[in-house]
Image: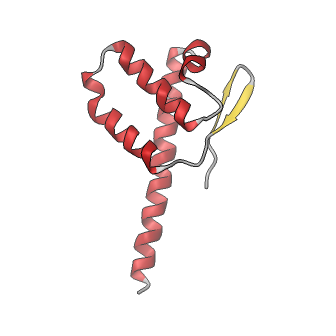
Amino acid sequence: MEKLEIKINDKVYTAAKPKARLWKKLVNFDEHKGDLSAEEFIDAHAEIMAEVFPELDKDFILDNVDLDEILNIYYKIFMWMTKLLTSKLNNVKNAEGDN
């Protein structure tokens, strides 16, 4: 599994192995982000980041990460999760083809 790491205040944080709930949260956020206020939009990004990086919490992220970097990290998380999910689905597809 590919590791996802971010750096905040010169410290490196490594993402935890993602669970299905995280994918559900990402999809739900993506489907409803247009309905959120600006504050809710930023909070949702920080909450997802805190779930991916268990050493961090939402308040730490909001207090220590620049706004543009929050969006950049979220994008990295989304791409990382998409790549992991695609890889898993391809493994299932290949296993089914072997039968």
* Outermost residue, right side: 10
User: What residue is shown at x 45% (from left), y 55% (from top)?
Assistant: 85
81 vs 63, left or right, is left
For the image, the number of numbered tags is 0
- Quadrant of the rendering where the C terminus is positioned: bottom left
Q: Whole-percent x and y of residue 57?
A: 58, 25
Q: Whole-percent x and y of residue 4?
A: 61, 42
* Outermost residue, bottom side: 99
User: What residue is shown at x 55% (from left), y 37% (from top)?
Assistant: 52
10 vs 35, left or right, is right
Taking depth in this image into account, of 39 and 93 the one nearest to the observer is 39
- Quadrant of the rendering where the N terminus is positioned: bottom right
Q: Whole-percent x and y of residue 89?
A: 42, 63
User: What residue is shown at x 75% (from left), y 23% (from top)?
Assistant: 10
Answer with the quarter of the image where residue 41 lies. Answer: top left
Relative vertical location of residue 11 with respect to residue 21 in this rendering, above or below:
above
User: What residue is shown at x 27% (from left), y 35% (from top)?
Assistant: 31
Relative vertical location of residue 24 with respect to residue 97 in this rendering, above or below:
above
58 vs 94, left or right, is right
Q: Whole-percent x and y of residue 13?
A: 68, 33
Check the image and tell me how it is coloured.
secondary structure
Taking depth in this image into account, of 76 and 23 the one nearest to the observer is 23
* Outermost residue, left side: 35
74 vs 36, left or right, is right
